[in-house]
């Protein structure tokens, strides 16, 4: 008997029962209805979603790739996740809709599963900013009738306006970020290592997520806590550097709830702050407060950036700015996802609308060897309302609150 020929290329398996998802069925249907309207407007037959953020946004399933491809296929009537056999039933339990599992005993079974869901489809929308050239070539070689059209920017635009359910979850994340910040602040003392302080913040946030979101998958929450020269980059990793009196510190907490990212970022000093550092810190706090005042419906991202640039230029500090002044929130993380059309930068002309969610996070970095050396950053999250914005970050900022004495 040839047992190999009897092994399936793909199959369905409903192992257990459906798990609670981050959002209601009404919310997922709202998202799918908007995507299906896009499908109709663009003359498509289906959309092949391949990124972690879009698969999670439309199905609730946040995959763990580990080098394997995943997908969510949305048609006029269906929503089907494509997952690897190594995950077995978990993707079906965590998916809003159907699931098809592909096996790895035969090369290209992933694409056979995709083509099974798209048997008579010709024009398909894809994420051109995620699907690799090799993957697209493979897709077209295995289905000669299929034509791909990049709709990644259109899909991103749909995600930029948050629903009431999303905003509720984001507010919960901001609250937990503050919990992590308090734990980080309490763990700071001379001689502590960056990793020790970071672990205190991460543990506090994961415990809070487990308490307040018991049906969620607990993963991906992290802390970047930097000190001294390590503060020069916003995304510098945690080290074993020991804290010393006079150090500039950067507190960054990132709770992840069902793929939804929130953040708290603050500048602190240990025990004392020298006059040059205090001057830079205060200038950045002023920029932060200016930026907070500019976040409102009708404001253009590039115009907000220009006003903060002018503030720093007047102080001869603009050359020390390291990145844009804020960005959108939603399904994103430090290793997947981004809503690049909603960032506070010179080259982004998006106009802010109610129910968008953005950060205000100016950062200055003074190089080592100069007075006030180090990286200074404050970060709040704002929800756009009909007439203004709501700041959902509560952790205090500035020299009056964040010079830590033990």
Image: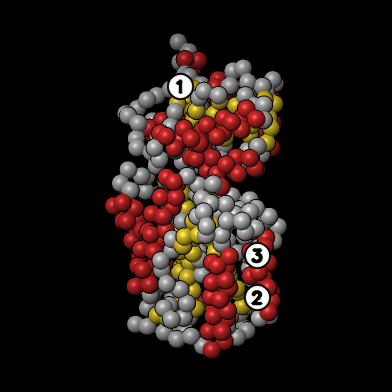
Mark 3 touching mark 2, by CB under 8 A?
Answer: no
Name which of mark 3 and mark 1 comes first in the sequence.
1
Mark 3 neighbour class, 10 Å CA radius: few under 14, some 14 to 19, many 20 or more: many
Q: Position of residue 306 (x, y in %)?
A: 68, 67
- Asked where in the image residue 372 lies, by quadrant, the reply is bottom right
Q: Residue at x 34, y 73 (%)?
A: 186
Q: Residue at x 35, y 31 (%)?
A: 18
Mark 1 neighbour class, 10 Å CA radius: few under 14, some 14 to 19, many 20 or more: few
Q: Quadrant of the N terminus?
A: top left
Which circle marks residue 305 in the picture? 3
Label 1 SS: strand
Name which of mark 2 and mark 1 comes first in the sequence.
1
Can residue 81 be seen in this snapshot? yes
Provide the residue designation for mark 1: 11
Q: CA distance from mark 3 to mark 2?
A: 11 Å
Q: Position of residue 255 (x, y in %)?
A: 42, 56
Label 3 SS: helix
Q: Nearer the viewer, mark 3 or mark 1?
A: 3
Q: CA distance from mark 3 to mark 1?
A: 51 Å
Provide the residue designation for mark 2: 312
């Amino acid at each position: 008997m040839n047992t190999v020929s009897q092994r399936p290329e793909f199959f369905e398996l409903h192992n257990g029962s459906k798990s609670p998802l981050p959002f209601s069925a009404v919310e997922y249907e709202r998202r799918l209805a908007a995507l299906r309207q896009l499908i109709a407007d663009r003359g498509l037959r289906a959309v092949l979603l391949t990124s972690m953020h879009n698969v999670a946004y439309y199905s609730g399933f946040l995959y763990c790739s580990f080098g394997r491809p995943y997908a969510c296929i949305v048609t006029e009537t269906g929503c089907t996740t494509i997952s690897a056999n190594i995950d077995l039933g978990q993707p079906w339990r965590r998916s809003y809709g159907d699931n098809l599992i592909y096996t790895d005993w035969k090369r290209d079974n992933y694409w056979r599963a995709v083509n099974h869901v798209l048997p008579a489809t010709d024009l398909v929308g894809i994420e051109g900013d995620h699907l690799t050239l090799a993957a697209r070539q493979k897709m077209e070689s295995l289905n000669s009738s299929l034509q791909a059209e990049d709709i990644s920017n259109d899909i991103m635009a749909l995600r930029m306006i948050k629903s009431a359910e999303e905003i509720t979850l984001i507010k919960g994340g901001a609250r937990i970020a503050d919990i992590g910040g308090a734990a980080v602040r309490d763990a700071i003392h001379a001689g502590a290592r960056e990793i020790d302080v970071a672990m205190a913040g991460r543990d506090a946030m994961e415990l809070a997520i487990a308490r307040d979101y018991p049906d969620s998958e607990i993963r991906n929450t992290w802390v970047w806590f930097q000190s001294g020269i390590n503060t020069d980059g916003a995304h510098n990793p945690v080290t074993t550097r020991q804290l010393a009196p006079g150090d500039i510190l950067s507190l960054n907490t990132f709770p992840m709830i069902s793929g939804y990212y929130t953040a708290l970022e603050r500048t602190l000093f240990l025990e004392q702050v020298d006059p040059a550092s205090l001057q830079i810190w205060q200038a950045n706090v002023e920029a932060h407060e200016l930026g907070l005042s500019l976040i409102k419906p009708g404001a253009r991202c590039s115009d907000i950036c220009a006003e903060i640039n002018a503030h720093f230029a007047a102080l001869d500090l603009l050359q020390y700015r390291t990145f844009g002044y804020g960005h959108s929130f939603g399904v994103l993380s430090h290793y997947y996802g981004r809503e690049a059309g909603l960032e506070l930068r010179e080259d982004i002309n998006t106009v802010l609308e109610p129910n968008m969610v953005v950060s205000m996070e100016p950062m200055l970095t003074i190089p080592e060897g100069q007075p006030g050396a180090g990286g200074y950053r404050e970060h709040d999250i704002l929800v756009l309302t009909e007439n203004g914005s709501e700041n959902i970050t509560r952790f205090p900022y500035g020299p009056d609150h964040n010079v830590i004495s033990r």
